[in-house]
Structure formats: C-alpha cells, structure tokens
Image (cartoon, coloured by chain):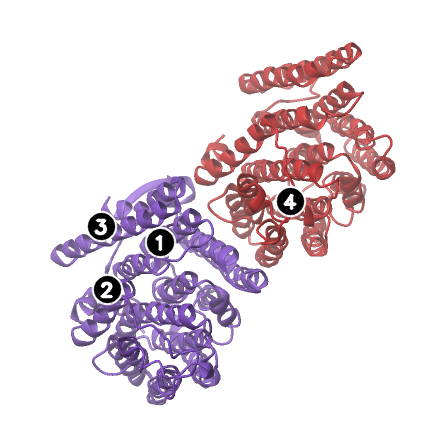
Chain colours: A purple, B red
Amino acid sequence: MFSLVLISFPFLAALLVLMTRKAAVAKWMSLGFSLLQLALTLIFWHFHTAGGNSFSFFLPWLPEWGINIHFELDGISFLMVLLTNLLIPFIIYSGIYKTQRNEQLLYALILFTQFALNGVFGSRNAVLFYIFWEMALVPVFFILFLWGGERRQSVTLKFFIYTLFGSLFLMIAFIYLYFQTSVPHDFEYTSFLKTNLEPCNQMWVFWMLLMSFVIKIPLFPVHTWQPDTYTVAPYQGSMLLGGLMMKMGIYGLIRWVLPVIPEFSLQWGFWIVIFALTGLIYFSVIALQQQNFKMLIAFSSLAHAGLMGAAVFSLNEYGLQGVLFQCFSHGILVVLLFYFAQLIEERTDTLILPRLGGIKTPAPVFSLLLLITILGSAGLPLTNGFIGEILMILGLFSFQVWSSILGVFTLVGGAIYLLYAYQRITLGETNPLTIGFQDITIREMVLVVPLVLLVIFFGFYPQPLLNLTEIPVRELISNAFSSH
Amino acid sequence: MASLIVLSLLGIFLLFLGLGKNKKFYAPFGIIGLLIALVLQITNSGQHSPLLENMVQFDSLASVFSSSMLVLTLMIFLLGIEYYKDMPKNVAENYSLMLFSLVGGLLMTSFANMVTLFLGIEILSIPLYILSGSKKKSYRSNEASFKYFLLGSFASAFLLFGIALVYGVTASFDISAISRFCSTHSEGLPPLMTGGMLMIFLGLAFKVAAVPFHFWSPDVYEGSPTLITAFMSTVVKTAGFAALYRLISHAFSPLPESMIWMLWILTFLTLAVGNLSALWQSSFKRLLAYSSIANSGFLLLALLSGDPQSPGTILFYTFTYSLATLTAFSLFFSVKKSSQGSEQMEIFTGLWKNNPFLAIMLTFALFSLAGIPPLAGFFGKYLVFFSAIRQDFLWISAFAILMAVVGIYYYFSVLRFVFSAKENPITIQYPKTSMVVIILCGLLLVILGIFPSLILSY
C-alpha cells in the first residue's frame, strides 16, 4: 500500500497543478508537492532500514493476461526512487524564478515524469514496467518539444523515435519471456527469473532487451540521439534526461537483463564491456574538443555512462554496488552542472567556453561551488563521484585487469576535460562579457548548496546508500551467477 | 435481427422525412433510431440461433461487432449535424444511405451463408459508391465515386466467382457445411477449393484495402466528403475484418497452409506499403488513408495468427482505431473549414496556440494511433503482437514492430505542425455536438487504455 501511495502521489499532484489558474501558484504548488513526496520517501527510507520492509503491493489488473499492478521497493529500486524524488524538487526549483510559456503544463509534465519514473523503478510486473517505461518518455518529449531551443522539433523527433524503437523490442522480448514462464503464464518478475530458455532463443531475447536499455542510457554506438537532445532541451529537460532518465536504462539492465538471462550476460558481457569502454574513451576525447559547455556536459555524461555500462557487465558485487552508487551521485552532479550552465547562460547569454573566462574575480563563491561540482564529476576523493568510480573500477579489476585500466581513463580524462572547462570559465582574464558577472545569489544558493553538501557528505560517508543496495546486489549475484 | 429491421425501416423513414425539407430533424431521428437498434442489439445478444433458414446468425461474435459499428455510426451522425449544416439538399438521402450501408455491415458480421456474405458486401458497397460521389459538383468526389465503383465491382466479381467455386466443390453455400468439408479434407483440399478461397479472400482484401488491392483507397479517401471517409475508415473497416474473421474461423477452418502463406504475404505487403507510403504524404486525408492501410496490416497480423483470442483482439483494435480516427477526422473537418478548405497538414499549424483543447484531443488521437501507453491504442498493438508471438509468427512480428516505429514517425509529424511556434491566425468554430463526440472518444480511449478488459471480456 505504501509503495502505491508513494508512486501515485506525483500523478495526483500533476493533475492538481494542471488545474490551477495562475502560473505562479502552479509553480510553487508543484515545488510543495515534490517536497512532500521527498519527505514521504525519507520516511519510507526510515522504515526500510529499520524493518527491511520492501513495501510490496499487489493488485490484480488483468489477471487473465498475467498483468498485475505489482510494486516492490527493494534496496536497488528504493535507491532509484530516492534519487528521483530527491532531484525533482531541485529540478522544479531551478526554473521557478524564470517565466516560461504555459507553466502549469510544464510543471505538471515534470511531476508526471516523476510519477512514471517512480513506476518504472517500483514495478515488478513486466507489462506494468513497460507501460511506465513508455509513459516516462511522453512528458519529456513534450517538455523538449514545446520548450526546447532551436531545431527542437527534428531533434526531439529523432530522440523519440530512437528510444521508442528500442522499447518496442522490449515489448516483444517480454511477450516472448511470458510464454516461457510456467503455466499459467504471467508477467511477474519472479516468474521471469525462473524461466529456462534454450540458448538459441536466449540470444535474441538478450539482444532485444539489451538494445532497448542501451539506447536509453545510451552506450556507444547507439548514442547518436543524446548530445543533440541534451543541448536542445530546456535546462529542466536536460536535468530530467541526464539526471534521471538515463538511470532507467542502467536500472533496466540490472533488473531485467542480468538476473533474467544470466548465461548470456556472462557470455557476452565481455563484448559489451569492450563497447562501453570504447565509448568511454571516444567520448572523453570528444568532450575535450567541445567549445559549448552544455555539449561538454552531454559528452561527459556519455563517458560516465560508458563506465557504468561496463561495470554492470563486470557482474560482481563491487561493480554493481559501484554502478548504483554512481547512478545516485552522477544524478546529483549532472543536475548541478546543468544548473551552473543555466546560470552562466542567464548571466552572459553564451555557453561558448572561449568567450568566457575570469569569472573567479567578480564571482568567487560561484566559482568555488562550481569547482566542487567539477571535482565531484571528475571523481576526486572525498566527493561522491570518487566512491562510485573506485567501486566500479574495483569491479572491472576483478573482471579483467585491462578493463579496469581503461576504466581509470574516466578519472583521468574527466579530470582533464572538466578542469580544462573550469579553467576556461573561471580563470584567466576577465573580458567585457564576464566583468560584470554577478556572484551567486541567495535564491540560487538554495538549490546549489544542499546539493553540493550532499556531494561532499556522500563522499565522506557513503554507507547509508551502500547499505541500501548491499543485500539485494549480493542476492542478485548469488542467485543468477552462483551456478556458473 | 431486430436491429436489422429497425435500421432498414429507419433508412426508409428518413428518406420520406427528406421530402419535408426540414433538415433539423434528420440527424436526431437517425440517432434515436440507432439508439433503439443498439439497445435491441445488446439485449438480443442472448439469442444465438440461426435465422431465416440459416442465412444469418447473430452469435456473440456478430453482436459485439455489430454493436461497435452501431456506436461508431451514432458518432458519425452526431458529427453529421455540423457537417451537413451548410448543405442545401439531399441531406436525408446521405443519412439513409449510410444506414443502408450499415445494414450491409451488420449482415457481413452475422452471415451464416455465403450468399448472405455477398449480399452484405453489396448492400454495404453500393450506398458507398453513391456516397463517395455525393459532392456532385466536385471533380474529385466524382472521380472517387467512379474509381471506387469500377474497382469495387471488379472485387465483387472475384468474390462471387470464388463463392461459386467453393459451391462447386462443397455443394453448399452454408458455412457450417463448408467448414465440415474443410475439416474432413484437412490433409489436402482440392485445388478448386483453394482457388475459390483465394478469390474470396482477394475480394475481401479489396474491401479492407490490403496491399496490393489498396490502390483505390487513397484516392477514394481523399476525394470523398470527409464524413464519408470517416465512415469508410471506421465502420466499413470493422465490417470487413469481422467478415474476414468469421470466414476464417467459421467456414475455412483449419486454414490450409497455402492460404496462411497468402495471408502472410498480404500482411507483410500491407504493413510495408501502408506505413512507408504514409511517410511521404503532405495531405492529412491521404495520411489517414495510408494509416488506414497500415492498420489493416496490423489487423491482418491478428487474423493470420489465428489465436483463440483473435476476435477480442480484432474487436478491440478496430474499435480503438476507429475512435481515434473519428476524432482526427472530426478535428480535421473543423480546421479545414476555417482554413479555406485546404487539406494539407499545414492547416494544423499553431493549433496548440489557437485552441489548446483541440490540440490535446488531436494529440490523444494520434498517440493512440501510434500506440503509446496509457491510451487504448497501446493495448490494441500489444494484443496483436501478443497473439502473433504466441503462434510463433516471430519474424513478421519483428517486422510489424519496425513498421510501428515508422507509424510513430508520421503521426508525430502532424504534431510538429500542431505544436509549432508559428502563428496561424485562424479562429476555429467547433460546434457542441462534435465536441460531445471527441470528448466521448477521448474518454473512451483513456478508459479502454486503463481497463481493456471492458471490451475483451465480452
């Protein structure tokens, strides 16, 4: 019951926000609702750690088809739900002082995304998962389509078709798996775990599932929708995409691929790691060339995604714990980075790095906070980025030594291109564009400071999050891979 | 049966009413009559025995399809109030011809005899030939009518020839006798029988615009008056697929291997040509025509799989497809009226700014057609893939999925205009009666998307 409340609350909130007359009311109302949702999540977290309760909820929906409303929040799901509900208030707040067109709809769509994401992470029935998976795409599509920048229509359409292409294969794979469950067939996650597929069929089910999740993350070489989409999206859209939607893909791999088709994940994991790491190096090099700060964030995101994808298929406890932790910290960091980009664009009207410079003199606090964020993204020790990356590299090390060496490249590469960007933004001579750069205001600090504190806090003390995922990850690994 | 009689009498009654020149009464009387027929149809559903010397049989399959066609015609009549407002004369004739066509449709869903099937198809088609040419002064409308008539009679001839061949082999028009013959000769049917089946299928494939018998459809859809196009793409499509399903399940079962292959090829071609041609359209009406062909492809896939759940799937798919198509046509008609009769997709430019409500309804319709959850179209597509995969039609399902993605592209290309930032200063007159229809359609699309078992558990 609790999980149903937690998942459906944002939907009701979205409806209420949509019905308000005044845009200002709608904005603050949506912020209030999202904070309430965060509070609810934290209360659940308390019960979660106290009693190990996973808030299972089961309601038959179309029982004759094996489709049920089945939610369950184990540690892995809960971590994702926590991330979603933590970031949404900040994403809403990031635009609250701007005036945009049709704000009721915009904020209702953000809350609707939150609903769909909570559903994706909580569902334990394949069709329910699929419906939420597709539904998450719709509000984001409209946010990009209606509030995006130039060329938004063609870019958004490409993004939509690309990801839908993947998810339709997800549907075929799920239907196929359904017929492999024991009679009476159903779409329950637990029944999927018990299926015994023939190797030849496993192969294409595996590729179909993989395709849909990997497009969503995205990993090399199906990433081509991502940089354009991130750049064209309005800032709130980019935050949703980079902070949260990308994690749907990672979560999908961990939840629906590894335990369901373990043999093939084991067999093909090696190649996926190679592809993911190729992407990592490729994107790091491209990121280094970027002149546009938003584009640079997009490519750095891709590089991080590469490491995460590789670590998922390292198939050991370190790797998976690291991926999940990194999902959390990358979410926070990406939202921060996009927010800084938004602030820079609001103040100077440009995101082109060579035109900026010398912000440090007029805006020291801004630069300090940006520095912490950038160091976090580069994975410096004592930031949350470091914990995730070191765990993932440990995971890759026990998988194949050479892959961990390549994995270290994110740390080095990230340090290079991010610090280079930082240098070009804040250091050097001020120019006419940046001389009057206003330092960060109290209003902006409300968003930045809590998140920066979280970056440092989880860098020092990652235990609460690691504890959440420890048991489910261990169970997942032992159930799926112990016999091989 | 009672609903058949009511509808025929209603048609004649409306014709007489047309003598009185009082246009206001036609649609309300028609709607009342349709409601009576619908009630009779629903209450009658328990009575399954064959009627008229075993010519028709309103079993549960027939009555659900009939009810769905009655509901759709009801909505089209509601839209007709606005559509025929400015038409000076012959309005009553239009309504009654639609009713006669509907009678044919009901016969096609309930036939128990090949002769009834043929009669049904002819009763359905002949009024349509007239209706598609009902804009007498329009060159394109006349062209549509003529084309439809010529090609349609050709298809009817095929059908009749096929029926004759089947009669020649089985010595019966009765579908249960034909079915007995098929099951006793299941190891190898005589070639004449297969030939007959093939011709009957081709005749029906023409009616549902399956490729390569689709060439009439874009031209006829484009040329006919919009309301008639809406009628053709909803009611007639439902009737065609109900008839095909009845034929396959009641008469020609088990289907011989060669026919399955023929259907397979038909499905493949329809999916490919329908979806890919839709990509290049700039006229909204033609786009909907190709979308109708494409959706025939998905429905053929459901037929082909021959799943026990197929009737539910086909019913659900045709009904939700029809609801979405009706919404799109109704909006198209109003917007077209306020843009000097242009039929290009550009007329939707800036609809979101002009009239957000209509824009949202159109988005609902297109999303449902594209099959995006939680709208009803999603479950339609899901059920089709579900039954196809269950019967191990894997490759064609994968192909259908690819084509579904193509479908999303062209439905969304309309949305590009709807949500474009360009100004388009037109005021759209949207009458209350049509508003009722699109709100009803929109609600049904959402409700059926969340509770698909409402229809599936008939």
Q: Which amino acid type is shown beneath numbered disc 3?
A: Phe
Q: Quadrant of the N terminus of chain A?
A: top left
Tell me the amino acid under the disc marked 4.
Pro
| Real-space CA distance between mark 2 and mark 4, rounded to the nearest whole angstrom | 58 Å
In this view, the mark in front (2 or 3): 3
Q: Closer to the observer: label 4 or label 1?
A: 4
Viewer-side label of 1, 3: 1
Judging depth in this view, the residue of A338 and A258 nearest the camera is A338
Say which amino acid is labelled 1: Gln
Q: Which mark is residue A114?
A: 1
Q: CA distance from mark 4 to mark 1?
A: 36 Å
Distance in Å between CA atoms under marks 3 and 4: 53 Å
2 or 3: tag closer to the N-terminus = 3
- Please tell me if label 1 and label 3 are on a single chain: yes
Please give the residue where the numbered disc 4 appears in the rendered image.
Answer: B425
- Give the labeled residue for mark 3: A55
B404 relative to A330 in the view: left or right: right
Q: Quadrant of the C terminus of chain A?
A: bottom left
* Nearer the observer, A290 or B164: A290
Q: Quadrant of residue B94?
A: top right
Asked if badges 2 and 1 are on one and the same chain, I answer: yes
